[in-house]
Image (cartoon, grey):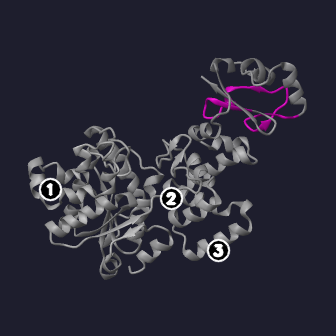
Amino acid sequence: MSKLIEELQWRGLIHDVMPGTAEQLEKEMTSGYIGFDPTADSLHIGNLVPVILLMHLQKAGHKPIALVGGATGMVGDPSGKKAERKLLDEQTIQANLAGQKAQLEQFLDFDCGDNSAEIVNNYDWFKGIGFLEFIRDVGKHISVNYMMAKDSVKSRLETGMSFTEFTYQLVQGYDFYQLYTHKNCKLQMGGSDQWGNIVTGTELIRRKAKGEAFALTAPLITKADGSKFGKSEGGNVWLDPARTSAYKFYQYWLNVSDEDAEKFIKIFTFLSKNEIEKLVAQHKAEPHLRTLQKILAADITTRVHSDQALETALKASQILFGKSTVDDLKAINEQSFLDVFDGVPTKVVAKSTLSSGINVVDLFVEQTGFLKSNGEAIRALKENSIQINKQKVQKEFSLTDKDLLNDKYVLLQRGKKNYFVVEFN
């Protein structure tokens, strides 16, 4: 237990830590929690750091509590926000909570004895509290001066901030108070932008419960090139494969810079210090092999998705960047296929045209326009540079519905890099 702070420190997972936190963690098994904001029905990779903090806490013998914000999601946290966000209705929040809860259960052990993980919903205690009761029993313990001094408030004073957002830190502080009094929870963790909200909770516990609680925050993850971590061209990189396929998820990590790979492998994997130091040395000796990126991408893809999903992602990667076969194409699902060939020219063709088969020249020219003329198609066939579904074909070839991938697609190719997708509907 005494090694937790030291472990988080070398991994780059500590930004601020309240005095006495290490001593508390050494003294006894400690319950610690992190709140998750239900703004979507899936967590994204920006949420992985708090999840990993909870995993480290549990691995060190302590009890992790994940708080899903059924109540706070209706209010909206101003931390790090330039403008007030749109508030969600209860039905949307409940759907989002269900999705996030299922994902959290993938990472934490909920059946391991005294330090089994637990999920709580702050709506359970807020639903019965009236406004007057809250400002009387909670508001009187925290001064306006104390609340105004918080960065999340000061940064918004010029542009304006609603009373709803201003009081958010009281609401989050009350969460900590509730968990302290009912579940003996003495530690709250989160991102560095949450420090102000977290210490409001420790202050409320000190003043209202005459108790002592602790705080620990991790730095907000940044990329070496200054671009936002967790974002791709299509937006957030989600943990839900229906939103971000395993292939795209794998590619995100595979494509990080050398500098980021060295940083991220400490943060996002549970490889030991010794293992990571060896990998870093190996990578620096042969950077062109991208050893760190490959191990990082495989490790996280397996943990977030599965071994099978990683295998699919690797097969999908091979299709574009290595030697692959029609069997490799057939092995990946529709979403992975579309992700691999995102941006490749596509033409929709009536499925009925397959009833008597389509000659290869007709397919490449008249049906799709991939090649400009019959003469060009015939020359390409003579050069042996035409492929359908990664198989080289001759001019006698005729396409039928048996050749369809996922019962609707065909991949055309001329040479090594010119692709065209046909969708039969």
Which residue is painted at 85% across and 30% down in the image?
394
Residue 278: which numbered mark, if any? 3
- Which quarter of the picture shows residue 5? bottom left
Determine if the magenta segment contains residue 306: no
x and y, in percent, of residue 333 in the image: 58, 41
Q: Nearer the viewer, mark 2 or mark 1?
A: 1
Can residue 70 be spotted in the picture? no
**Rendered-image quadrant of the N terminus:** bottom left
Residue 139: which numbered mark, if any? 1
Q: For marks 1 and 3, give the CA distance.
A: 53 Å
Which residue is painted at 61% across and 29% down in the image?
408
Q: Secondary structure at mark 3?
A: helix
Amino acid beneath label 2? Arg
- Which quarter of the picture shows residue 404? top right
Determine if the magenta segment contains residue 407: yes
Q: Secondary structure at mark 1?
A: helix
Residue that numbered label 2 is attached to:
303
Q: Nearer the viewer, mark 2 or mark 3?
A: 3
x and y, in percent, of residue 162 in the image: 25, 43
Amino acid beneath label 1? Gly
Towards the viewer: 221 or 175: 221
Amino acid beneath label 3? Lys
Q: Is 37 situated left or right of 361 in this image? A: left
Magenta stretch bounds = 384-412
Would you place residue 395 above or below residue 121 in this image?
above
